[in-house]
Amino acid sequence: MNSKDTHHLTFEDKEITLIGTAHVSRESAELVTRVIEEDRPDTVCIELCESRFQALTEKNRWRNMDLYKVIKEKKAFVLLSNLMLTSLQKRIGRKLGIKPGEEMTRAIQAAEKVDAHIHLADRDIRTTLARVWHYMSLWSKLKLIVNLVFSVGQVNTIEKEDVERMKNEDVLETLLSELGQFLPGLQRILIDERDQYLAYKTRTAPGKRIVSVVGAGHVAGIKKYLHSPIDMQMLEEMPPKGRLVQFLKWGLPTCIIGLIIWGFFVAGTAVGTDMIKWWILANAVLGGLGAVMALAHPLTVLSAIAASPLTSLNPMIAAGWVAGLVEVFLRKPKVRDFESLGEDILTFKGFWKNKITRVLLVIVFTNMGSALGTFVAIPLMVRAFA
């Protein structure tokens, strides 16, 4: 099959046909089907990890989701981020008249038709997100969260040139492209590292005749790294938590408790009491406000208010987890919430309406409010001491 989007490569005794697809292009989806059915390869590599493969192929996976487990395993932000990325991709696809991931779906269907092995070639999105998160500054992280939230309502403002860029980028790359201009390291993590990962997975795929389906933006990198040494252990390594994170987790609560004790002994009971008052007030108000912003149940808001001052001093638990568990108990998602999740995430209103996404918003917003309350409380406490 001759096409400007197909590239014929060799590695040792393997014949590799690399197809560079546009993620939102009907022509790419049709090309993938034609190439696989005509070449009849032993293996079809696709630019998906296990979690994204399941999201694409298991239509009822939301019904099996255990929200209690999500909260306990501290995966609420990751799940909410994935839902927002899915939302953006779906709405882009609708605007262009094609289902998101259609070229990958066609690759899977064509592989099954010719009895080819399906080989997942992309790095786990959680590893990629963790490596991106580790590299970013606090300001960049806040900016990314805002971009994720407000991307829900931005599809109608997409211009033609944006669409052309999205054909060669996946959704995560698109959202981070602006930050990438100021943080060149993101380019390395999102593109270069994944190019290496895709190249390694393609060249080590079983069989001698391989068709590899990847985004067009990765083709040049895969060609570059196909015959190069690749350190897979480094590429799959989850980054260690930074010193600042460790300090904020353990050192900050210790310092705050020490400051309150110091206030009692040095400035007297009245000052120490004032410091405790400001600590409780700042944390409770902002933690509760976060729950209110997520339209939480009134009792959930009260639980956020009660938990925030205490959990901010306990590195092992967060106010958002407490509020999230209370929200699940009070407003347990029903079957219709799971069935309508795919549609509800397409609108800003839907994220707050659906009980599943509302729980995730309660967790994230309460945690953000409680964290902000900590930093608001400190100067108020120092002022009382002074």
Image (spheres, grey):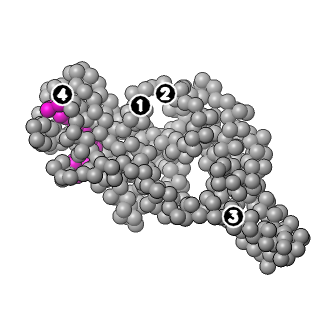
Residue range in magenta is: 207-222
Question: Label 3 neighbourhood size at 10 Å, few (<14), some (14-19), many (20+)?
Answer: some
Label 4 residue SS: loop
Q: Position of residue 206 (x, y in %)?
A: 21, 32
Q: Are marks 4 and 1 in contact (CB under 8 Å)?
A: no
Determine if the magenta segment contains residue 76.
no
Determine whether label 3 and label 4 are within 8 Å by CB: no
- State the residue in front, 109 or 65: 65
Sequence-wise, the earlier of marks 1 and 2 is: 1
Q: Nearer the viewer, residue 296 or 15?
A: 15
In the rendering, which numbered label is found on residue 77? none
Please tell me the numbered disc located at residue 54.
Answer: 1
* Residue 84 coordinates in the image, percent (x, y): 50, 43
Q: CA separation, marks 3 and 1?
A: 43 Å
| Residue under pointer 2 | 61
The residue where tag 3 is placed is 254
Q: Which residue is mark 4?
A: 42
Which callout, 4 or 2, points at the residue further toward the start of the chain? 4
